[in-house]
């Protein structure tokens, strides 16, 4: 700090390297606080020229702001960033300690601008400082020109440059310098310049298309190393280069299927085909046609087709001077101009067959052989030929003596041999038939027996050869869980980071392919995380589990190998409920009305999710004025009187009071551990019910006598139902009568007399005490009138007598007289209506069926009438 001056009580500070903003202060003789400038290598002061390594761990205290106030006041420190900038640090206002709160990355941001401030409560000084982020070796080299496919002529001279590898390392210093080398360089045909990355053919080495068509070279780019987290660290990356060799005309023809064996049989005739040789141009990329010819050994007894290579017999076998002919066959390339070029030689052994004295024999490249070995990758394509097995089978006899079968004996049906029937000699071909069974995880190697057995000879000569196939592993298996699903239980009060369940998946593949990494996903996975290596699932550190909010979670866990093959399993997590909620009544003060003989019920609710935590037991803790009046059902909460209390007189005898309101303290306790309880005060008014003959409906009316709306609603429903039934019956009766009024023919029709049913009306309000006490319908003898009167005698429960007059509609007229009515039956009444020309008996009606509900309703109405009459009598008295 160079100095300061005062102008109208406003202090302005000047600094050579920093922008300083000073708030106006109007306190007299008040000087602004200031930072100590301790230099760039100090860890306290004003952060001037401070630098910080990018590998500093988050949470590290990196610096301490330090300053003072000239008046000696306590100072406070502050730290802020430009708007929109990431906040990498946090400061303690009192101590000035600055802590790193965000991860640093020099390759993304190599400097950070910070505003530091100091204040004494009146004046505030703000300085802008720049913190420099120092590099560490945390970036590995990255190849730029990938993937790389190189095509090169096989005649390219040794030492020629064929490719330049380029890699970039974003680190600085030695960590950003790169050297190149080839992985496993000893058997390689190539070399690379360590500094430039130029790939060359090694000196003294040549490329050969016929030997290897494609080369794979792995180039390693390694940096010069550097410090990271306090340790020396070297980083590297690799890239695989594919080098395709282009064929040139530099290889002579070669014969296929050698050695060659042909046979002349005693029955052979001139022109018989003895053997066919096959040769191909060694330059398989651009082959030329082949010309065949004899070079020596044919003695003029054989000829060869110059294009097909077929050898034929020119004379009869009896004129052959030797038993075995070794004929040298020449295969020459033919240029596009028709000129013979490079050639190859092969010997064809032709034997004149006489006796069956030779068994089948297996040959390899170097002669007779009894064991053949091959190394190949597992699961080759079905139908693929095992070209690494070069097997020839030969029987030196002639004719039928040289005919034999080939069989392959071994585990399963993985391989098949072709041909299965051989005459004299054949190239043995082994084909893949069951690729899935050739599994490295099941068998590292396979052993077969190749059996050749003669068919039509009495000797049945045979030969065997062992075939051993060594399998190499591929990544053909996905990780597999030990179970398709996992069930876990965890208490709801478990802290964050609690162990939930451990899942296990195995991958039978070898090496990196067998390493499994775990992850979880799904809608229920938000509160959990999994360790990718161990498969242990934990709750999130911030997670709070509550069984009352949600007690079931399910999500998926994924097991994945290095190449992305994976399998899934489902995890079901149940949050175990703890007894953390007490029972609660809807109201702590309840009022109930109890009818003697009927209980009243109280209810409490427990918000816990599971039993027994939410199972409630009820108990009466106290009852006033007497404790020996009530019982309570511990499970349902029904409060009832003791069994011996049958009337109000017993209660009045106990309490010595005529009217009494009871006060009960009822406890609701759950069955959890620990157990919680709550109490409520229940005020009960006891009344004595009047016995009704209405059954359950009567009890319903008495219990709800203080709720008139419910009673009126029930009565309205019953009346509506009765009206609907009455309308339906009337409609049915009208339609039936209407159908009976049709015009009949004018002749005498004799009908069988019908039994006339009379009306039998029962008292709807009172069940008769004796069968003969019934309502009877009486008809008065009077002059014919349009509407007769029916007087019904109604005797109700309380002996009130009323007369009911019903007016019946006139019956329809009939065309003829009906049969005479039956004689009068006591207790029943025939119903006859006079008409102009005749009297027609009314159509009989079914006796009304009185249900139990109707009986109850009528009894209730009678009971209400009786009560009204009693009240009226009390008023008059």
Image: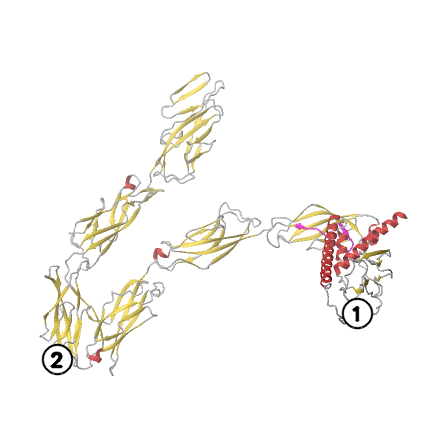
Indicate which disc residue 819 carries.
1
Query: Quick check: 494 left or right of 38?
Result: right
Q: Is mark 2 on a helix, strand or loop?
A: loop
- Circle 2 packing at 10 Å, graded few (<14), some (14-19), many (20+), is some
- Say which of marks 1 and 2 sits in front: 1
Q: Foreground: 540 or 484? A: 484
Indicate which disc residue 316 carries.
2
Residue with the most extreme front position: 746
Query: Quick check: 342 left or right of 659?
Result: left
Residue with the most extreme right position: 877
In the rendered image, the vertical position of residue 111 relative to residue 704, given as above or below? above
Q: What element carries label 1?
A: loop
Contact, mark 1 vs mark 2 (Cβ under 8 Å) = no
Q: Foreground: 188 or 842? A: 842
- Magenta region: which residues? 593-604
Q: Residue at the spot x=14%, y=64% of the render? A: 290
Q: Residue 697: which quarter of the image? A: bottom right
Label 1 or label 2, whichever comes before in sequence order:
2
Which colour scheme appears in the figure? secondary structure
């Amino acid at each position: 700090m160079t100095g300061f001056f005062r102008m109208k009580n406003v202090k302005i500070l000047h600094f050579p390297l920093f922008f300083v903003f000073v708030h106006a202060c109007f306190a007299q003789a008040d000087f602004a606080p200031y930072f100590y400038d301790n230099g760039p290598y100090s860890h306290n002061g004003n952060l001037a020229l401070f630098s910080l390594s990018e590998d500093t761990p988050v949470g590290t205290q990196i610096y301490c702001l330090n300053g003072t106030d000239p008046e000696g006041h306590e100072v406070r420190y502050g730290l802020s960033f430009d708007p929109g900038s990431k906040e990498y640090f946090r400061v303690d206002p009192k101590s000035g300690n600055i802590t790193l709160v965000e991860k640093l990355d020099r390759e993304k941001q190599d400097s950070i601008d910070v505003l530091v401030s100091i204040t004494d409560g009146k004046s505030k000084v703000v300085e802008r400082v720049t913190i420099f982020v120092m590099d560490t070796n945390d970036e590995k080299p990255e190849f730029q020109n990938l993937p790389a496919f190189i095509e090169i002529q096989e005649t390219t001279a040794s030492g020629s440059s064929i490719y330049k590898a380029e890699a970039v390392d974003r680190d600085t210093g030695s960590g950003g310098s790169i050297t190149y080398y080839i992985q496993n360089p000893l058997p390689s045909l190539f070399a690379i310049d360590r500094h430039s990355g130029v790939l060359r053919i090694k000196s003294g080495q040549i490329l050969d298309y016929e030997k290897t068509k494609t080369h794979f070279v792995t180039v390693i780019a390694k940096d010069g190393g550097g410090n990271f987290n306090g340790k020396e660290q070297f980083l590297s990356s690799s890239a695989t280069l594919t080098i395709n060799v282009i064929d040139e005309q530099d290889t002579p023809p070669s014969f296929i299927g050698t050695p060659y064996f042909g046979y002349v049989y005693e029955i052979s005739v001139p022109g018989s085909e003895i053997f066919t040789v096959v040769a191909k141009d060694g330059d398989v990329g651009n082959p030329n046609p082949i010309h065949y010819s004899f070079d020596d050994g044919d003695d003029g007894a054989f000829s060869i087709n110059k294009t097909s290579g077929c050898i034929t017999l020119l004379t009869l076998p009896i004129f052959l001077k030797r038993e075995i002919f070794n004929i040298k066959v020449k295969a020459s390339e033919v240029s596009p101009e028709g000129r013979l070029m490079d050639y190859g030689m092969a010997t064809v052994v032709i034997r004149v067959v006489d006796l069956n004295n030779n068994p089948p024999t297996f040959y390899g490249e170097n002669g007779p052989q009894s064991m053949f070995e091959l190394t190949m990758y597992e699961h080759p394509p079905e139908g693929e030929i095992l070209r690494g097995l070069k097997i020839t089978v030969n029987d030196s006899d002639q004719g039928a003596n040289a005919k034999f079968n080939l069989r392959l004996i071994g585990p399963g049906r993985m391989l098949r041999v072709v041909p299965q029937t051989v005459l004299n000699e054949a190239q043995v071909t082994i084909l893949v038939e069951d690729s899935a069974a050739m599994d490295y995880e099941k068998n590292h190697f396979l052993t077969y027996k190749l059996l050749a057995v003669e068919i039509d000879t009495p000797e049945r000569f045979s030969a065997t050869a062992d075939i051993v196939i060594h399998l190499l592993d591929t990544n053909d298996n996905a990780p597999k869980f030990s179970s398709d699903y996992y069930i876990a239980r965890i208490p709801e009060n478990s802290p964050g980071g609690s162990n939930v369940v451990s899942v296990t998946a195995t991958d039978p593949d070898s090496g990196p392919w067998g390493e499994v990494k775990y992850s979880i996903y799904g809608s229920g996975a938000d509160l959990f995380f999994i360790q990718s290596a161990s498969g242990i699932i934990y709750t999130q550190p911030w997670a709070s589990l509550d069984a009352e909010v949600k007690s079931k979670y399910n999500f998926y866990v994924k097991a994945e190998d290095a190449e992305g093959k994976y399998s899934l399993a489902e995890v079901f997590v149940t949050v175990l409920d703890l007894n953390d909620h007490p029972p609660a009544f809807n109201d702590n003060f309840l009022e109930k009305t109890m009818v003697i003989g009927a209980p009243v019920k109280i209810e409490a609710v427990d918000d816990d999710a599971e039993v027994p935590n939410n199972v409630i037991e009820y108990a009466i803790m106290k009852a006033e004025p007497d404790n020996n009046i009530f019982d309570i059902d511990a499970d349902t909460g029904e409060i009832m009187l003791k069994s011996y209390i049958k009337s109000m007189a017993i209660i009045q005898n106990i309490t010595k009071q005529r009217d009494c309101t009871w006060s009960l303290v009822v406890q609701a306790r759950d069955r959890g551990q620990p157990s919680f309880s709550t109490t409520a005060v229940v005020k009960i008014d006891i009344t004595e019910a009047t016995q009704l003959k209405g059954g359950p409906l009567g009890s319903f009316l008495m219990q709800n006598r203080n709720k008139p709306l419910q009673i009126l609603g029930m009565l309205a429903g019953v009346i509506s139902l009765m009206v609907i039934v009455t309308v339906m019956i009337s409609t049915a009766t009208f339609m039936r009568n209407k159908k009976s009024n049709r015009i009949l023919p004018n002749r005498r029709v004799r009908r069988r007399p019908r039994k006339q049913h009379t009306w039998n009306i029962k008292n709807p309000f009172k069940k008769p005490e004796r069968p003969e006490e019934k309502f009877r319908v009486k008809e008065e003898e009077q002059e014919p009138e349009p509407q007769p009167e029916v007087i019904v005698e109604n005797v109700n429960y309380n002996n009130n007598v009323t007369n009911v007059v019903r007016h019946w509609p006139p019956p329809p007229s009939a065309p003829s007289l009906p049969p005479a009515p039956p004689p009068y039956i006591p207790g029943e009444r025939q119903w006859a209506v006079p008409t102009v020309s005749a009297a027609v008996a009314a159509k009989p009606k079914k006796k009304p069926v009185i249900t139990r509900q109707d009986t109850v309703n009528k009894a209730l109405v009678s009971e209400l009438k009786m009560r009204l009459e009693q009240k009226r009598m009390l008023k008059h008295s």
